[in-house]
């Protein structure tokens, strides 16, 4: 009799353990799904943060070898030499602002507007401390600009240390050196230090088609 009771007890324990084990598996699977979901979210966040850090954290000693100011002062836009800091007054009467569709960010007091040279579109500029095209004066600073190769003016759209549109990667490296990093793949080459950065974009034929620059010491500048 005692043996039967003991057997029944053991059977009940085994059955109970099996049931608990089954429910535990379900719970574990749910937990694993939650962990995977959380991990993927965390990895995305870490990846995003890492990307932001690459863009915004102070530059390393190797990166700081790039002379941003010297490069600005070797840059010509439609024959007009730039100087640091860049102001609208540096551009002559042949340059005009297209006021038909400016992008205005009032809370940051910046305007992104298309700029023309002799009625030819050359690119986009970011103007600081203004919320209307009428606010732009010769003293208005420019924190960023992008010049695109439209091949539509009577002078070179932009030159940087005599480098111009149509140049290839090798010519860029020969001009500005090997102190660069890739942006969106090898087709975008970035030179930078803590004052600002230059972006050189190439097409699939290894031909330079866009040059942009950003001045970093302006709080309104987009990284």
Image (cartoon, rainbow, N blue to C red):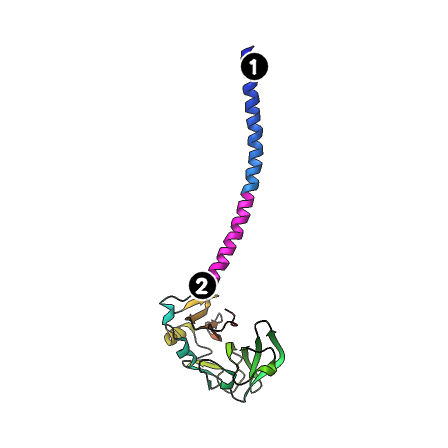
62 shown above or below 75: above
Measuring from the top left, give residue 136's x and y in whole percent: 57, 82
Neighbour class for label 1 at 10 Å: few (<14), some, many (≥20)? Answer: few
Residue under the point 56% across and 10% down? 1
* Label number found at residue 54: 2
Q: Which mark is residue 111?
A: none
Q: Which residues are magenta?
A: 32-54
Magenta stretch encompasses residue 47: yes
Q: Nearer the viewer, residue 1 or 29?
A: 1
Front in this rendered view, residue 93 or 175: 93
Mark 1 → mark 2, Cα distance in angstroms? 70 Å
Q: Name the residue located 55 percent from the left edge and 27 percent from the top edge.
A: 17
Q: Classify mark 2: helix, strand or loop.
A: helix
Residue contact at pointers 1 and 2, CB within 8 angstroms:
no
Query: Whole-percent x and y of residue 43?
Result: 50, 53
What residue does disc 1 label? 5
Q: Earlier in the sequence, mark 1 or mark 2?
A: 1
The residue tagged with tag 1: helix, strand or loop?
A: helix
Task: Tell me what residue is drawn at x 54 percent, y 15 percent.
Answer: 6
Residue 178 visible in this rendered orientation of the protein = no
Q: Residue at x 55, y 23 (%)?
A: 13
- Residue occupying the far right of the picture: 100
Main secondary structure type of the part rendered in magenta: helix
Which quarter of the picture shows residue 59? bottom left
């Amino acid at each position: 009799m005692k043996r039967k009771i003991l057997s029944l007890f053991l059977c009940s324990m085994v059955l109970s353990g099996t049931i608990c084990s089954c429910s535990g598996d379900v719970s574990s699977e749910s937990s694993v799904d939650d962990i995977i979901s959380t991990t993927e979210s965390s990895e995305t966040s870490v990846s995003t943060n890492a990307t932001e850090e690459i863009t915004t954290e102070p530059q390393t000693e190797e990166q700081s070898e790039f002379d941003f100011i010297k490069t600005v002062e070797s840059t010509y836009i439609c024959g007009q030499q730039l100087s640091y800091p860049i102001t609208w007054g540096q551009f002559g009467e042949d340059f005009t602002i297209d006021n038909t569709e400016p992008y205005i960010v009032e809370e940051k007091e910046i305007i992104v507007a298309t700029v023309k040279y002799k009625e030819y579109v050359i690119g986009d500029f970011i103007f600081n401390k203004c919320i209307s095209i009428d606010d732009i004066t010769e003293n208005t600073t420019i924190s960023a600009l992008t010049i695109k190769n439209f091949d539509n003016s009577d002078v070179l759209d932009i030159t940087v240390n005599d480098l111009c549109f149509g140049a290839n990667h090798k010519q860029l490296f020969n001009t500005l050196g090997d102190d660069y990093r890739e942006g969106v793949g090898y087709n975008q080459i970035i030179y930078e230090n803590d004052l600002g950065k230059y972006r050189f974009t190439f097409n699939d034929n290894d031909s330079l088609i866009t040059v942009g620059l950003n001045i970093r010491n302006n709080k309104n500048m987009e990284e």
